[in-house]
């Protein structure tokens, strides 16, 4: 079971590495042109291309890249002339901080909304919570971020517009990143809790005279959180991917904004390194979620 999951994860990572390498080299755009500008001579371009190794055949460049990966070397940035691993390590804490804050926002919104919607099924709290959920799923980050920025930063002046300068600057990016995930989780909490509340042991708990609050929170919500935890694990990867847009909107100095800068400059090694780190995080979280779910539920482990 564990070997099969790890094998699948390795195949996915290898596929991502290959696809990203081929796409970044096949799309239009020349890093040499981006670095030297239009005024450079043909001799200067040829010399820089030879210096960077871009004059070699694509297969030879791919073999050199894979050989570097096998040694744990992500290469050197064409633009910054620094190791890619060093640049990624500098930006990774900011992305992890934003992802953790976005996850906290998602949980703080989703759990009460989902519980209230399930307990008050069909009433106005249920309709209000599901309307929020629909709005959260429908509104993209690249629209919600500027909207929050206009309201809370430019009009009210309560929070910084952009950058990473203290806890206040984290609020708007975290709200932008966490709202979409909160909407998905709230629907999952509601559906899972409604299913659990219809079980026999819930009726037994009520028949024993337990307070309704204890029945819902102690017996209902605890059992309803297993599928929610699975979905949460699967969505963590999407949270990191969504950070690319959010970091760009708020000039947040994480891996997302680093990836966008690298793509704009056609910095091949840096793009490949950033995408590889994001893919590894996504695959690792999903693999751990699958293994944890199989460990918790024997039916999954036995393939039933």
Image (spheres, rainbow, N blue to C red):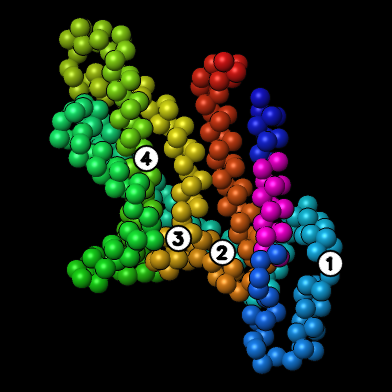
How crowded pointer 4 is (Cα within 10 Å; few <14, some 14-19, many 20+) is rated as many
Establish if 52 lies above or below 218. below
Q: Which residue is mark 1?
A: 57
Question: Going from the N terminus, do you reach mark 1 or mark 2 first?
Answer: 1
Discs 4, 1 touching: Cβ within 8 Å: no
Q: Is residue 289 left or right of residue 225?
A: right
The stretch in magenta equals 11-25
* Point 84% across, 70% down: residue: 56
Alpha-carbon span between mark 3 and mark 2: 10 Å
Q: Which residue is mark 4?
A: 184
Establish if 32 lies above or below 271. below
* Point 20% across, 7% down: residue: 207
Q: Which residue is mark 3?
A: 245
User: Residue 57 placed where, x, y %?
Assistant: 84, 67
Look at the numbered disc 3 and give the secondary structure of its residue: helix
User: Residue 16 placed where, x, y %?
Assistant: 66, 50
Q: Which residue is mark 2?
A: 259
Residue 70 visible to an observer of this rendering: yes
How crowded pointer 1 is (Cα within 10 Å; few <14, some 14-19, many 20+) is rated as few
Look at the numbered disc 1 and give the secondary structure of its residue: loop
């Amino acid at each position: 079971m564990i070997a099969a999951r790890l094998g699948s994860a390795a195949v996915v990572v290898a596929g991502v590495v290959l696809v990203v390498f081929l796409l970044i080299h096949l799309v239009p755009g020349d890093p040499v042109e981006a670095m030297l500008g239009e005024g450079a001579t043909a001799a200067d371009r040829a010399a820089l291309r030879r210096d960077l190794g871009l004059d070699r055949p694509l297969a030879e460049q791919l073999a050199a890249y894979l050989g570097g990966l096998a040694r744990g070397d992500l290469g050197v940035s064409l633009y910054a002339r620094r190791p890619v691993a060093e640049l990624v390590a500098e930006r990774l804490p900011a992305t992890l901080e934003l992802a953790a804050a976005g996850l906290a926002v998602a949980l703080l919104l989703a759990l009460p909304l989902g519980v209230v919607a399930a307990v008050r099924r069909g009433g106005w709290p249920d309709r209000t919570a599901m309307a929020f959920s629909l709005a959260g799923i429908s509104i993209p980050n690249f629209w919600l971020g500027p909207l929050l920025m206009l309201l809370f930063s430019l009009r009210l002046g309560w929070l910084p517009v952009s950058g990473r300068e203290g806890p206040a600057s984290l609020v708007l990016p975290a709200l932008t990143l966490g709202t979409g995930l909160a909407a998905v989780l709230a629907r999952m909490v509601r559906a899972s809790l409604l299913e659990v509340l219809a079980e026999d042991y819930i009726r037994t708990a009520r028949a024993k005279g337990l307070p309704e609050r204890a029945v819902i929170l102690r017996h209902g919500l605890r059992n309803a959180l297993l599928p929610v935890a699975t979905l949460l694990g699967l969505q963590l990867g999407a949270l990191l991917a969504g950070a690319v847009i959010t970091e760009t909107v708020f000039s947040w100095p994480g891996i997302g904004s680093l990836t966008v800068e690298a793509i704009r400059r056609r910095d091949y090694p840096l793009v490949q390194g950033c995408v590889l780190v994001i893919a590894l995080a996504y695959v690792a979280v999903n693999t751990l979620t699958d293994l944890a779910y199989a460990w918790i539920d024997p039916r999954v482990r036995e393939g039933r």
